[in-house]
Amino acid sequence: MGAAPLPRLDVVHGDYSSSNILLGSADRPVTFIDCQTIGRGTRVRDLADLYRQSFVYPDPANTGARQLRSAALEAEGPQVFAKCAVAVTLNNLAWWAGNKTAAEFDRACSALHDLFDDIQEA
């Protein structure tokens, strides 16, 4: 795959998942929570986190994963996307190993095999 330096120009959440986004209304903006990992990096890192989540908690058509992958590829290309997707997946699995049941961890591992297959197609 070759070298793929990770850009550091964007502000990233660092733990970007749907559980850390509170949707607003017409008179109230979207709010982000669990912000202790905000820093500089590439926006692809946050896109990859949502992409990973779309495999653990898939929608039937899997349109979210395709849209997130497309946005990440357009932003920085396949090598940066693959690095970020693998990194956030391994980080999240480490969290699941300590915070979820063995059955939940096994289910996530099975779902994430599909993610790795999908990355290879990118």
Image (cartoon, rainbow, N blue to C red):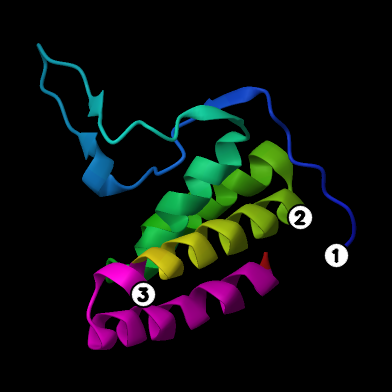
Residue 79 image label: 2
Residue 73's spot in the image, x, y percent? 66, 48
Query: In the rendered view, would you say 81 is above or below 37?
Result: below
Residue 74's spot in the image, x, y percent? 66, 41
Give the farthest residue toward the front: 98
**In the rendered structure, which disc, 3 or 2, sits on the residue that comes first in sequence?**
2
Choose mark 3 or mark 2, whichever is in front: 3
Residue toward you, 28 or 16: 16
Mark 3 and mark 1 in contact? Answer it, CB < 8 Å: no
Bin the neighbour count of mark 3 within 10 Å (Cα to Cα): few under 14, some 14-19, many 20 and up: few
Q: Is residue 60 left or right of residue 43?
A: left
Question: Which range of residues does the magenta coloring cover?
Answer: 96-121
- Identify the image quadrant of residue 69: bottom right
Choose mark 3 or mark 1, whichever is in front: 3
Q: CA distance from mark 3 to mark 1?
A: 29 Å
Q: Which residue occupies 20% across, 17% down? A: 29
Q: Which residue occupies 38% across, 55% down? A: 64
**In the rendered structure, which disc, 2 or 1, sits on the residue that comes first in sequence?**
1
Q: What residue is pinned by disc 3?
A: 97
Query: In the rendered view, would you say 40 is above or below 104?
Result: above
Q: CA distance from mark 3 to mark 2?
A: 27 Å
Q: Is residue 118 magenta?
A: yes
Q: Which residue occupies 57% across, 50% down? A: 70
Can residue 103 be seen here? The reply is: yes
Query: In the rendered view, would you say 103 is above or below 11?
Result: below
Residue 120's spot in the image, x, y percent? 68, 73
Q: CA distance from mark 2 to mark 1?
A: 7 Å
Q: Quadrant of the C terminus?
A: bottom right
Amino acid, disc 3? Ala
